[in-house]
Image: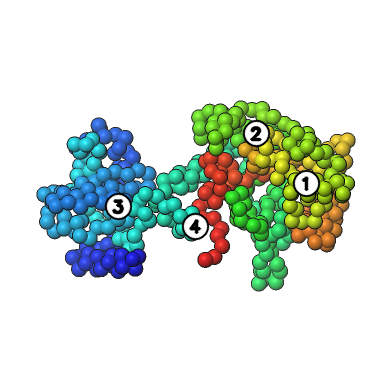
């Protein structure tokens, strides 16, 4: 069936050219977008306008036909009349125009008897002939697999998908404005790293022919941004793509956008304040209020947010003491009792991480800050005074999702080297996501880094939250997919 439609449209294209009509034309002057005409009918009534868009509905009659044009922002009805166009031009509309064609029209604005704002077309111009039929006659593209594989069809057919793209652009712009207003400088750091660092994750590897070395797509920009702090840039941020060689799920995509922020002479308490101010600012700008309903939950983003320690959270939500999990038998019994699967070796650190993700976070509505983490989970964070096994780290949790990660940065080069060596030993034991040694970064710290706090926020998850979506892939214009 699709092939028949394709061939029919190819024949129509040929007929257009035989009539001296070029189906793929150059620029078209648009005087008014559809939304402006719809919003200002009283001013534009009986006025001449020109606009262009895709034909998304078409009703052909004897001497008068109607179509709807979608210009990407709004849809408006256009009216073709034999008396206005002449027999030859009108015949082209009735016989050679198809759904999906992109058309430019000029005409006057009026209202039909049913009250619909319409353009009475005096002239038209084919701008692009669609050779393939659009999905489901504009009732919406519902096949999830097709939506992600042919994202352009999804954007054509589903207004909601287009709205999420616009929401993402708005939020990114607001983030830049918020940080720049507070004196932060936007910077760019390398995407190809000689050593993959800044997070516990498996990297993608590539080979540089000229240098004859392996390079890695960055898993985080953290270590380069800290080098900038060492170099005297006290407030920096970067919005950029990161890559982690991990599975694909509703909350993970191998390619994602990360915001990282670093502030010298600050600690994680200062960064908590910045984080809640930033996210609350975004909520207020998007929804007009700090109190919003998302996914059926009533949330209040008014600062300050609640703060609880990870130890308290494990007691309240998982019914277990973190320190008790250091006992191997108790630890294994616990995960067996609650059916917690640990893909890595069931060390204290790995089990804590899984319990956090499987039992603690899903129960938290938030917004809330989970604070103070074990050092084994945070090789780049500063020790908590008086608690050598713990670090000054927090994560904002909203509707059961980690919305970011932040800590007071470790500035002691000797301690950093020792932690890297511990990670190297973990990697030797088979822990693929352990952090590698980075001698150059340690050397940078040896020149002295001021007390600093850093924050990372996944932009895709943030858009998923603000858009009320359940899948990260809805927020990414072209998500990663398994090949057909």
Q: Looking at the picture, tell me which residue is in the foreground, 52 or 95.
A: 95
Instruction: Look at discs 4 and 1 and give the one toward the viewer.
Output: 1
Which residue, given by chain and number where applicable, does mark 4 sit on?
145
Badge 1 density bin: few <14, some 14–19, many ≥20, Cα 10 Å: few
Which residue, given by chain and number where applicable, does mark 3 sit on?
55
Which residue, given by chain and number where applicable, does mark 2 sit on?
366
The quadrant in which residue 278 appears is: top right
The quadrant in which residue 454 appears is: top right
* Badge 4 or badge 1: first in the primary sequence: 4
Rounded to the nearest whole Å, what is the CA distance between mark 2 and mark 3? 45 Å
Instruction: Look at discs 2 and 3 and give the one toward the viewer.
Output: 2
Which residue, given by chain and number where applicable, does mark 1 sit on?
337
Horizontally, residue 484 falls left or right of residue 427, namely left
Residue drawn 20% across the image and 68% down it: 18
Label 2 sits on a secondary structure element that is loop
* Badge 1 or badge 2: first in the primary sequence: 1
* Badge 2 or badge 3: first in the primary sequence: 3
Residue drawn 69% across the image and 59% down it: 203
Residue drawn 49% across the image and 42% down it: 167
Badge 3 density bin: few <14, some 14–19, many ≥20, Cα 10 Å: many
Instruction: Look at discs 4 and 2 and give the one toward the viewer.
Output: 4
The reply to whether discs 1 and 2 touch (Cβ–Cβ < 8 Å) is no
Horizontally, residue 232 falls left or right of residue 33, namely right
* Badge 4 or badge 2: first in the primary sequence: 4
Label 4 sits on a secondary structure element that is helix
Rounded to the nearest whole Å, what is the CA distance between mark 4 and mark 2? 32 Å
The reply to whether discs 1 and 3 touch (Cβ–Cβ < 8 Å) is no
């Amino acid at each position: 069936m699709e092939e028949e439609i394709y061939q029919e449209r190819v024949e129509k294209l040929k007929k257009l050219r035989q009539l001296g009509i070029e189906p793929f034309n150059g620029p078209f002057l648009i005087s008014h977008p559809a939304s402006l005409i719809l919003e200002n009918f009283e001013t534009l009534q009986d006025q001449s306008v020109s606009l262009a868009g895709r034909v998304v509905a078409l009703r052909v009659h004897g001497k008068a036909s109607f179509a709807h044009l979608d210009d990407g922002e709004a849809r408006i009805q256009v009216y073709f009349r034999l008396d206005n166009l002449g027999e030859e031009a009108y015949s082209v509309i009735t016989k050679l125009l198809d759904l999906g064609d992109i058309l430019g029209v000029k005409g006057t604005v009026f209202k039909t008897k049913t009250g619909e704002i319409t353009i009475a077309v005096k002239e038209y111009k084919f701008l692009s002939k669609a050779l393939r039929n659009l999905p489901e006659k504009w009732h919406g593209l519902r096949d999830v697999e097709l939506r992600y594989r042919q994202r352009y069809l999804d954007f054509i057919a589903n207004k909601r998908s287009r709205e999420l793209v616009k929401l993402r652009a708005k939020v990114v712009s607001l983030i830049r404005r918020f940080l720049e207003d507070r004196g932060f400088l936007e910077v760019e750091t390398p995407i190809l790293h000689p050593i993959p660092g800044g997070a516990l994750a498996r990297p993608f590897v590539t080979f540089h022919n000229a240098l004859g070395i392996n390079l890695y797509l960055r898993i985080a920009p953290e270590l380069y941004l800290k080098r900038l702090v060492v170099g005297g840039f006290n407030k920096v941020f970067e919005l950029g793509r990161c890559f982690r060689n991990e599975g694909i799920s509703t909350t993970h995509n191998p390619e994602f956008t990360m915001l990282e922020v670093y502030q010298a002479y600050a600690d994680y308490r200062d960064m908590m304040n910045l984080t809640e101010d930033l996210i609350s600012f975004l909520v207020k700008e998007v929804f007009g209020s700090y109190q919003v309903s998302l996914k059926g939950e009533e949330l209040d983003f008014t600062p300050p947010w609640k703060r609880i320690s990870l130890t308290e959270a494990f007691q309240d939500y998982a019914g277990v003491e973190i320190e008790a999990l250091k006992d191997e038998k108790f630890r294994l019994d616990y995960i067996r009792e609650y059916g917690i699967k640990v893909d890595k070796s069931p060390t204290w650190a790995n089990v804590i991480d899984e319990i956090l993700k499987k039992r603690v976070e899903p129960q938290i509505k938030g917004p809330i800050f989970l604070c103070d983490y074990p050092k084994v989970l945070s090789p780049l964070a500063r020790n908590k005074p008086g608690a050598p096994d713990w670090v000054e780290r927090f994560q904002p949790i909203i509707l059961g999702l980690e919305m970011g990660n932040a800590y007071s940065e470790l500035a002691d080069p000797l301690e950093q080297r020792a932690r890297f060596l511990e990670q190297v030993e973990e990697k030797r034991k088979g822990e693929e996501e352990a952090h590698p040694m980075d001698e150059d970064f340690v050397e940078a710290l040896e020149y002295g880094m001021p007390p600093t706090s850093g924050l990372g926020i996944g932009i895709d998850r943030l858009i998923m939250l603000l858009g009320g979506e359940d899948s990260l892939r809805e927020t990414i214009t072209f998500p990663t997919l398994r090949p057909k």
